[in-house]
Amino acid sequence: MVERLTALLAKRWWLPVVLVWALTRIVSTIGFLWAASIQGPSFWYPYANPAYFDFLNIWDVEWYHRIFDGGLGTAPGYPLQLPTDGNGVVLQNAWAFMPGFPLLVRLLTFVTLGFVSWAPLAATTSLVLSFALALMIFKVFRLRFDAKVSLWGVAFFGLWCASPVLQAGYAETLGILVLAGGLYFLMQHRYLAALPWLVGLSITRPGMISFAAALAGMWLVRWFKNRKGTDEFPTAERWRLAALTAASALLGLVWPIIAWIATGRADAYTVTELAWRTYDPHAHLALLDGWFALGASIWGEYWGSMFVVLVVLLAAGVLFLPSVKALGNELRLWIAAYFLYLFLVFNPQSSSWRILMPAFPLMAALAFATRKSRPWVRWCIAVALILTQFVWLSICWVYVNPDYTPP
């Protein structure tokens, strides 16, 4: 079995990836159809059991739809004046969502001559892009592991509880695709080739600041190794990596600067993001605040603080697992930087399972950790992940008024 798989991968490496990914998409499609069958009337549709594409056109897809329909300074698009309530508190608006994905779908309307509406076109675009994402993730994993481990890593990622979102009109598919492209070239120290992918990431999903932090960490690691004589880090390469780090940091500021210029408010992007913290209408950006607020709301001040400490220890412990160390410096640093970014500014909630998806290399680490296990172990993991998809869909995607568990 292994020998035949190896021979097939050598000739057509992409074919097993496509087949495995197609199976994961079938699972997610079945999950969506099941969830739609139990969906009652919702905020978006006054009727129960919505059709497939209608059911995929809810939650944050609505915001991307508005950006698709409008643009800068238009009612459904990006407002030139931030909407506020009677007390001057900024309300939820499109500036929290970057334009990369809806612009791509808008471009595809020219290909379809405008005969395909947003709902099916956005979902189909995400689905098609997800196959490109699977191939790119496989190529990233193959830089560290053999074909079998890499293929299982792709399968585990495709079965992750929040992976159905990869075929809905969210920006996750495109965002993780360009992220994986940037990581692929970074791991080969092809810094110029990584730059276009990072430009795409900067207008698709948040995360460029954490990528810049990972690059800075990579520069320091290689510099120390060079000092010890365990790694070559030529002067020219030092400058190239430093330049990519600086460019990434600047790219991380592109969208907030655009929002500032368009609205005239320097904090336009930040206050818009904070508008989703409905539990505090006067929320302001304070590092670590989201985690301590969550802990305190559930367990009180003292035990809530212990919860935060536990989260930090667990995240740090994951980074030092042998299977995660096998990912190599670049992927480990990316995961560490992304975890740090989430810990500093993220407001933990039901969306956390989706927000964790850019840490996809952990799925390769899981596959590597079980590489010597009996086959039934990996299959049990796959079945468990499938079950979590149905749980996630029933809790996070199915809308029950009032709903405080967004996907």
Image (cartoon, rainbow, N blue to C red):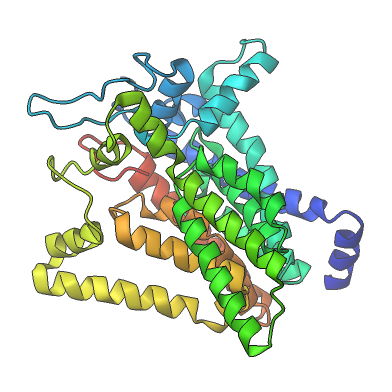
Q: Nearer the viewer, residue 116 or 141?
A: 141
Apparent side of residue 181 relative to residue 43 in the rendered image (left or right): right
Q: Quadrant of the C terminus?
A: top left
- Residue at x-position 27% and y-position 21%: 81
Horizontal side, residue 293 vs residue 66: left or right: left
Q: Is residue 387 visible?
A: no
32 up-or-down from 73: above or below: below
Count of labels shown?
A: 0
The image quadrant that residue 267 belongs to is top left
The residue sitting at the bottom extreme is 228
Q: Is residue 109 above or below residue 231?
A: above
Q: Position of residue 343 (x, y in %)?
A: 33, 62
Residue, x 91% and y 65% (percent of image)? Answer: 7
The residue furthest front is: 235
Residue 346, above or below 83 = below
Residue 98 % position (x, y): 45, 34
Furthest residue in direction left, as rendered: 87
Q: Where is residue 283 drawn, in percent x and y?
A: 16, 45
**Res. 314 in view:** yes
Relative to 326, say whether 121 is above or below: above
- Tell me what residue is drawn at x 7 percent, y 29 percent: 87
Residue 363 location in percent, x, y? 57, 65
Left or right, 352 with respect to 15, comes to: left
Image quadrant holding the N terminus, namely: bottom right
Q: Residue at x 75, y 69 (%)?
A: 148
